[in-house]
Structures are given as structure tokens and as C-alpha cells.
Image (tube, rainbow, N blue to C red):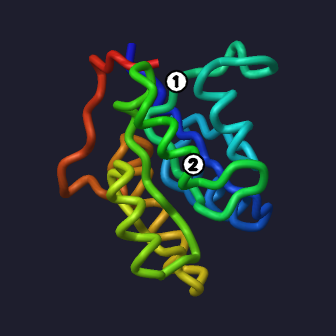
Amino acid sequence: MKQVPEILLVDDNAADVYLASEALRMNSEACHIANVGDGEEALAYLRHEGRYAGSVCPNVVILDLRLPKKSGEAVLAELRSDPNLRKIPVVIFSTSRLNRDIVRSYELGANCYLSKPVNLSEFVSTVQLIGSFFGCGDAGAKGEKWNDQNRTYC
């Protein structure tokens, strides 16, 4: 039985969460999308703490940088320092186009940094490509997809 891809979307902007979730659902019905709205919740989800005790380990984390309670940068740093979580792919998806944010994200171990497009169709297309690469949909069927069937994290 094929495993359903899991995506954790970490963003405090309700409109972006809605658009990204819908874009991923348009790609594929066989994809589970969880979302949390701040950095502390993201870490609790990934560590299966509190109300997230039953959470599923995601195939990828789509992480905004500007979050309440704990920044996306701080979340990324903690993920990469935790032996149980460091191998989870993290895509930074932020409105920031500042070079220092991009460089710092890669220094902390981000797998990818994408600036959120302002144009709706570009936003949807970008999110669908992220999902497709990590096994949620077929928009990237012509290229290689991430394969983590034998993952050993979480």
C-alpha cells in the first residue's frame, strides 16, 4: 500500500494557508496537509508533544520565516539540531526577498528557499511544484520526485 504524502504547512497568514492548501489539493487527493500557525506549534507538532501527540511525521515542512512566538529561522535551527528531526526536508516559503534571509536560511540547513509570488497563478503553481517534488501530485511528473519511502526520521 502506497504511503500518503504528508505536508506540514507552517504559516500564520490564513489566506496563504488556504491558498497553499487548495493548490496542493488541486494537485492530488492523495495528500495530507496539516498546518500550524506559529513556530512553537510547529516544533510541538514535529516532536509529537501535547495535542500533537498523534501527529504524523511529514515528508516535507513548508515554513514561513515571519511567525509569532518563534520565528521560522529559530524553528529551522532547532530542527537541524535535533537528531530525530534533522533529516526532514524544509522548504522556506516566505515573502522576504532579502539576501540575508536567504543566505541565513541556507546556512541553517534549509533544503530550498522560495519567495512567495504576489501573483495568484504563480503562487498556486509554485506550491503545486513543491508538493509534486515531495510526492503530492503529478505537476512535476516529467522530472524526478523526492523518494523517502525508507525514511528514518521522526
Circle 1/circle 2 CB separation < 8 Å: no
Tell me where residue 98 appears, x and y as whole percent. Answer: 47, 81
Q: Badge 2 local density, few (<14 within 10 Å), some, or many (20+)?
A: some
Number of on-image labels:
2
Residue at image position (27%, 40%) is: 146
**Residue 84 appears in which quarter of the rendering?**
top left
Which residue is depicted at the point 53% across and 40% down?
Answer: 7
SS at circle 2? helix
- Foreground residue among 110 and 82: 82
Q: Position of residue 36 (x, y in %)?
A: 72, 43
Name the one closer to the observer, 30 or 92: 92
The alpha-carbon separation of the residues under discs 1 and 2 comes to: 19 Å
Q: Residues within 10 Å of mark 1 (few under 14, many from 20)?
A: some
Q: Residue furthest bottom?
A: 119
Q: Residue at x 45, y 40 (%)?
A: 60
Report the side of 29 relative to 128 (left or right). Answer: right
Q: Position of residue 26 (x, y in %)?
A: 56, 56
Residue type of the residue flagged with mark 2? Ala
Residue 73, position as x, y percentages in the image: 54, 55
Residue ID for mark 1:
57
Disc nearest the viewer among 1 and 2: 2
- Whether 61 is drawn above or below 92: the answer is above
Q: Residue at x 66, y 38 (%)?
A: 42
- Left or right? Give the position of 150 relative to 73: left
Task: Determine whether 111 is above or below 4 in the image.
Answer: below
Query: What numbered label is drawn on residue 74?
Result: 2
Please name the amino acid that badge 1 sits on.
Cys
Q: Earlier in the sequence, mark 1 or mark 2?
A: 1
The N terminus sits in image quarter:
top left
Q: Nearer the viewer, residue 126 or 44?
A: 44
Using the image, tell me which numbered label, if any, was put on residue 134: none
Q: Secondary structure at mark 1?
A: loop
